[in-house]
Image (cartoon, rainbow, N blue to C red):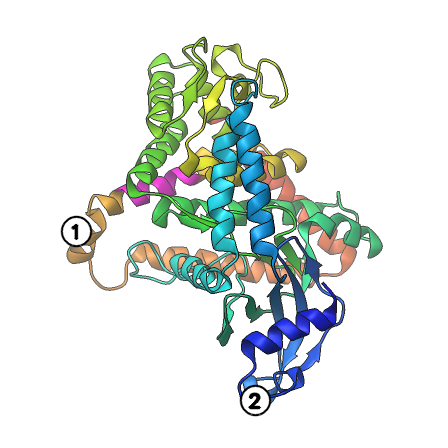
């Protein structure tokens, strides 16, 4: 979209009656967009004093007449998937139906602004709202009064998308395989796991379009998450069953316990997973372990871990519940990152405590605890002290001279890897 057209859309949608020029709102407006996609493009700008500036912002602008075109394309894909339903390895009709639902909301930027705030607010406090919690990544906030259906003005995050991070590191002479980079990789993995885990399991409302273009490595070393156009709400009952699946996976006694495997499989089927008529009895359990536990060496039923293998448990899927298609997408993103970073990662074990918290809250246990306990709890002080210490230590490491910083980062990575291997051995020997 030419910049003149982009400015025209902004002027039409946001300027007041007493304003004639876009310069009344922005003292700077970059000609070249930061990013451009099928629905919209984003420009960096600086708000004028009249609008609370000078403040650096990102302006998301919808392409004119794009809505009917894209929805028409999705309708054609749905029809094709329906016609070929029996021939395709997966039920793509369900996938395209979910995409159609998501796209309909994505054309309304007011809904995106609401979603951005809702996810931020859900993460900024504990599940019962009793205490503030630290969010391990940056979520941009919309600018009040500068939001409409086709234009959204929000915080500007200065950095590069994860998809370009390696290229940028090489340009700056930084080794992508250095200890510092590996340390950052673990930080990234843990931040995404935490944010998606809490959003999915606690409120059921989460960012549904996670990909390396929407995850940013910021100039100050923090991690950013952008583009909240696609979000998903999971029902309370489905969320409860999903929490039980995570706990069954996290608390199982090894990978060969028949009783545990049967429980995991039954819960997966309760979620709405449908299998081929000739699927092995272990198929449902194998699908759950493949999706949510990357530390498994051997899947039950003799299935292969490789997604493209003819013997992958994914091949046994006849249909995946539409509600959970986008949960699967988030899970596969994190699973793929852990694979690229060569870090064994079990989403189930990471999400297990969050799942237990969510089930306890649903059962009313938090309300009971609040009545029984008042004042400052010792465990809260310890947790806060640890969090403060980690933040100080991280800041100190980044300020060290390069050679020393590399050595310290290498030592931290070794300790973390040793702990991860030890935890893995303990879990497998249960």
Toward the viewer: 375 or 155? Answer: 155
- Give the CA separation, mark 2 to mark 1: 49 Å
The magenta-colored residue range is 351-359
Circles 2, 1 touching at the beta carbon (< 8 Å): no
Q: Secondary structure at mark 2?
A: helix
Q: Position of residue 41 (x, y in %)?
A: 66, 61
Q: Residues within 10 Å of mark 1 (few under 14, many from 20)?
A: few
Disc number for residue 12:
none
Disc number for residue 368:
1
Q: Residues within 10 Å of mark 2 (few under 14, many from 20)?
A: few
Q: Position of residue 95 (x, y in %)?
A: 51, 35
Judged left or right of residue 349, residue 56 is right
Taking the magenta stretch, the answer to whether it contains residue 356 is: yes
Q: Is residue 245 above or below residue 366?
A: above
Q: Quadrant of the C terminus?
A: top left
Number of the front mark, 2 or 1 = 2
Residue placed under numbered mark 2 in the picture: 50
Location of residue 270 (image quadrant)? top left
Q: Quadrant of the N terminus?
A: bottom right
């Amino acid at each position: 979209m030419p910049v003149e057209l982009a400015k025209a859309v902004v002027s039409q949608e946001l300027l007041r009656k007493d304003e004639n020029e876009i310069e009344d709102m922005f003292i700077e407006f970059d000609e070249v967009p930061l990013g451009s996609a099928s629905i919209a493009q984003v420009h960096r700008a600086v708000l004028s004093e009249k609008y609370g500036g000078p403040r650096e912002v990102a302006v998301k602008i919808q392409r004119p007449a794009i809505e009917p075109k894209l929805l028409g394309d999705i309708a054609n894909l749905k029809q094709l998937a329906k016609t070929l339903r029996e021939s395709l390895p997966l039920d793509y009709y369900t996938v395209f139906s979910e995409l159609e639902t998501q796209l309909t909301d994505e054309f309304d930027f007011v809904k995106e602004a609401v979603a951005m705030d809702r996810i931020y607010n859900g993460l900024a406090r504990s599940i019962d709202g009793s205490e503030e919690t630290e969010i391990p990544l940056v979520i941009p906030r919309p600018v009040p009064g500068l939001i409409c259906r086709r234009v959204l003005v929000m915080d500007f995050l200065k950095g590069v998308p994860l998809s370009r991070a390696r290229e940028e590191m090489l340009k700056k002479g930084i080794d992508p395989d250095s200890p510092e980079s590996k340390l950052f990789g673990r930080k990234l993995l843990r931040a995404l796991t935490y944010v998606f885990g809490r959003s999915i399991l606690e409120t059921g409302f989460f960012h549904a379009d996670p990909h390396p273009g929407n995850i940013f490595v910021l100039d100050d070393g923090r991690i950013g998450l952008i583009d909240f156009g696609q979000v998903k709400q999971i029902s309370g009952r489905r969320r409860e069953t999903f929490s039980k699946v995570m706990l069954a996976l996290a608390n199982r006694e090894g990978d060969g316990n028949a009783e545990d495997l049967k429980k995991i499989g039954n819960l997966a089927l309760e979620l709405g997973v449908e299998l081929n008529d000739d699927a092995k009895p272990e198929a449902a359990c194998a699908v759950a372990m493949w999706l949510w536990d990357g530390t498994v060496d051997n899947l039950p039923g003799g299935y292969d871990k490789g997604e493209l293998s003819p013997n992958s448990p994914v091949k046994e899927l006849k249909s995946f519940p539409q509600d959970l298609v986008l949960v699967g997408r988030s899970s596969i993103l994190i699973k793929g990152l852990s694979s690229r970073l060569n870090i064994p990662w079990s989403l189930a074990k990471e999400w297990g405590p969050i799942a237990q918290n969510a089930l306890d809250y649903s059962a009313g246990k938090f309300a009971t605890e609040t009545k029984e306990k008042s004042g400052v709890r010792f465990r809260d002080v310890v947790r806060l002290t640890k969090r403060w210490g980690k933040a100080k230590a991280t800041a100190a490491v980044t300020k060290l001279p390069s050679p020393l910083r590399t050595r310290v980062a290498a030592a931290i990575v070794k300790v973390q890897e040793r702990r991860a291997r030890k935890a893995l051995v303990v879990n497998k020997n249960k």
